[in-house]
């Protein structure tokens, strides 16, 4: 495991190569924030690179103020020399995508700390999740998602030429959205008042994620503009998925059966307290992204370390539980109840195997394993292949679904 404190100290005063990703301001902020950790996991990212596994295996937990990455990954290789040229590691933009997702996760964690500072009564890191508080915490989580997307994509990537900042031949113009500032004249045909490069946009995007409605556009507008359709269709789908996933994950963390609303059920942001919170976060995010205000906008960890964890005695949902932290002797007796839960068990199991050691012939049977939903069949198929052990810092509670 890389000693991050020593790594951060080692680059002080070191010359940064023009092709280093540390030339990207938000990458540098995330890399240097002392409260943010990089934590390796027993996952081989090669499975995702080649498309055998349709998800990223790192996982996510903003309450832990950390970025999780596969111990075998381009990100892990980059950490060995972050000041050097990133070109050789960036085949098909795989490295840059991983590093930008690190920034995305960083902004999530940063936003949680800002919410905690601006509105401590919410107790976002420690408050009990129950039927009455669930949507408060879902709102907070969707606000952090809007912060990550607005800060990195809308205010930074979509407004700059990334290759001019770090000339490594990248094709990336955005990470999670299909918007670009150069298309603003087309969007203005349908919504002349649309302004993205302003702090007020964070409230619009948060409302979008919480309700599925983007003010200023209607269905006919999407039909008349392929560019607008490409942008907002993705965001509409993304927002619905985020509402559903956030509710399901936080309900699971609660450790008690909680009824969750359907994805199309909106979360109200039109209360004075929520509006003030969004605007307060927006002001700080604008300063962080647009003015490089890193010193005053670093993560401020809660006074009491985060301890938001799901009870271990409930049946594991492998969208939200790190398989590496479930005792291996229990695996054979598990039978995830749903098709999705079983799929995530399979993805996480494979991720603990080095891709290079798995014969391609075995992978031909993977579709049958997924159809049969039989844990024993999976374990028998890959019996004899060495599983990696969990790293010390990786937690049991991880949002694996992505």
Image (cartoon, rainbow, N blue to C red):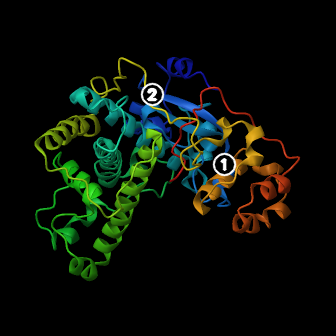
Q: Does residue 266 appear in this view?
A: yes
In front of the other: 20 or 121: 121
Residue 155, numbered circle:
none
- Residue drawn at x 37%, y 38% is 129
Q: Report the number of discs.
A: 2
Of tags 1 and 2, which is closer to the observer? 1
Q: Position of residue 322 (x, y in %)?
A: 61, 41
- Residue drawn at x 20%, y 52% is 268
Residue 364 sits above or below residue 266 on the image: below
Residues at badges 1 and 2 in contact (C-beta under 8 Å)? no
Q: Residues within 10 Å of mark 1 (few under 14, many from 20)?
A: many
The residue furthest right is: 384
Label whose residue precedes the other's in the sequence (1 or 2): 2
Q: Which residue is mark 2?
A: 36
Q: Which residue is mark 1?
A: 348
Secondary structure under tag 1 reads: helix
Residue 85: name its quadrant.
top right
> Horizontal placement of 293 versus 166: left or right?
left
Residue 254: name its quadrant.
top left
Q: Quadrant of the N terminus?
A: top right
Q: Does residue 354 appear in this view?
A: no
Q: Position of residue 131 (x, y in %)?
A: 33, 45
């Amino acid at each position: 495991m890389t000693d991050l404190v020593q790594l951060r100290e080692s680059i002080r005063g070191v010359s940064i190569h023009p092709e280093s990703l540390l030339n990207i301001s938000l990458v540098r902020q995330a890399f240097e924030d002392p409260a943010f950790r990089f934590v390796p996991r027993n996952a081989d990212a090669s499975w995702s690179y080649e498309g055998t596994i349709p998800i990223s295996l790192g996982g996510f937990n903003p309450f832990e103020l950390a970025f999780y990455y596969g111990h075998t990954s381009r990100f892990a290789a980059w950490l060995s020399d972050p000041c050097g040229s990133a070109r050789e590691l960036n085949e098909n933009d795989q490295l840059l995508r991983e590093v930008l997702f690190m920034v995305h996760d960083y902004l999530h964690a940063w936003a949680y700390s800002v919410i905690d500072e601006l509105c401590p009564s919410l107790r976002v890191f420690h408050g009990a999740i129950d039927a009455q508080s669930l949507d408060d915490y879902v709102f907070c989580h969707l606000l952090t998602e809007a912060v990550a997307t607005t800060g990195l994509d809308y205010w930074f990537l979509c407004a700059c030429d990334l290759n001019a900042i770090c000339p490594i031949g990248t094709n990336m113009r955005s990470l999670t959205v299909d918007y670009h500032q150069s298309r603003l004249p087309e969007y203005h045909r349908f919504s002349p008042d649309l302004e993205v490069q302003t702090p007020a946009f964070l409230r619009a995007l948060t409302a979008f994620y919480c309700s599925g409605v983007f003010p200023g556009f209607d269905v006919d507008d999407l039909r008349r503009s392929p560019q607008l359709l490409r942008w907002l269709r993705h965001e509409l789908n993304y927002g619905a998925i985020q509402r559903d996933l956030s509710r399901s994950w936080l309900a699971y963390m609660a450790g008690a059966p909680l009824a969750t609303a359907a994805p199309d059920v909106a979360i109200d942001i039109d209360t004075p307290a929520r509006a003030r919170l969004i605007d307060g976060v927006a002001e700080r995010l604008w300063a962080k992204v647009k003015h490089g205000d890193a010193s005053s906008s670093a993560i401020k960890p809660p006074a009491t370390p985060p301890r938001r964890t799901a009870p271990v005695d409930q049946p594991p949902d492998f969208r939200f539980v790190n398989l590496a932290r479930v005792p291996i002797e229990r695996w054979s007796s598990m039978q995830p109840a749903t098709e999705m839960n079983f799929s995530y068990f399979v993805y996480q199991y494979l991720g603990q195997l080095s891709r290079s050691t798995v014969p391609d012939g075995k992978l031909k049977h993977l579709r049958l394993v997924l159809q049969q939903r039989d844990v024993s069949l999976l374990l028998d198929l890959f019996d004899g292949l060495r599983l990696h052990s969990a790293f010390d810092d990786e937690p049991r509670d991880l949002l694996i679904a992505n």
